[in-house]
Amino acid sequence: MLTGWGGNIDKDLPAGILAIEEAPHSWLLPQCRAVIHHGGVGSTAAGLRAGIPNIVVPSAGDQAFWGKRVAELGAGPEPIRLQRMTEDRLMDAIQQVLHDPQMQERASRLGENIRSEDGVGETIRLVEQTFEY
């Protein structure tokens, strides 16, 4: 469990759960079968880039948009709003991402596509094209 800037660590975590403040997504996520996150654009991008299913639990801002986008792409289930979170809903989502081979394949293919892009190069090309340098 990554606590992020808030550093909220429950001192009574169950066995097998490690809480740390931060870790490089580019290293950590490819080692995982799925990721559960708040749906911020950075976390969503990292989860999709890793090619694993994303479970999004939005609470504010644009997080719900990104959660819906993940579901539309087939790379995760419908988002679970934080206000509606229950143990059963979260367990259902976890079971879905772990046992749905089509979702796993879509997430994997999407990750491959994202990793093969030259985002910086394409951005430069579009800026130059737009401003005719």
Image (cartoon, rainbow, N blue to C red):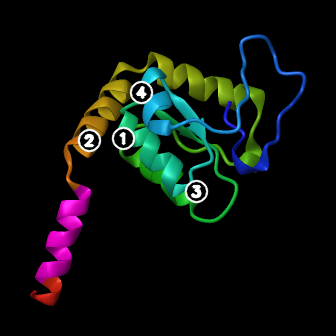
Residue lying farthest to the right in this orientation: 12
Q: Is residue 48 left or right of residue 93?
A: left
Report how far apart the C-alphas of labels 2 and 3 lie in the structure: 24 Å
Check whether the beta carbons of the residues at disc 1 and disc 2 lie within 8 A of each other.
yes
What residue is pinned by disc 2? Answer: 115
**Where is the N terminus found, in terms of image quarters?**
top right
In primary-sequence order, the first of circles 4 and 1 is: 4
Check whether the beta carbons of the residues at disc 4 and disc 3 lie within 8 A of each other.
no
Check whether the beta carbons of the residues at disc 2 and disc 3 lie within 8 A of each other.
no
Q: Magenta part of the protein: which range?
A: 119-129
* Label at residue 49: 1
Q: Is residue 62 left or right of residue 70?
A: right
* Label at residue 64: 3
What residue is pinned by disc 4? Answer: 30
Report how far apart the C-alphas of labels 1 and 3 lie in the structure: 19 Å
Indicate the secondary structure of the residue bearing disc 3.
helix
In primary-sequence order, the first of circles 2 and 3 is: 3
**Is 122 within the magenta?**
yes
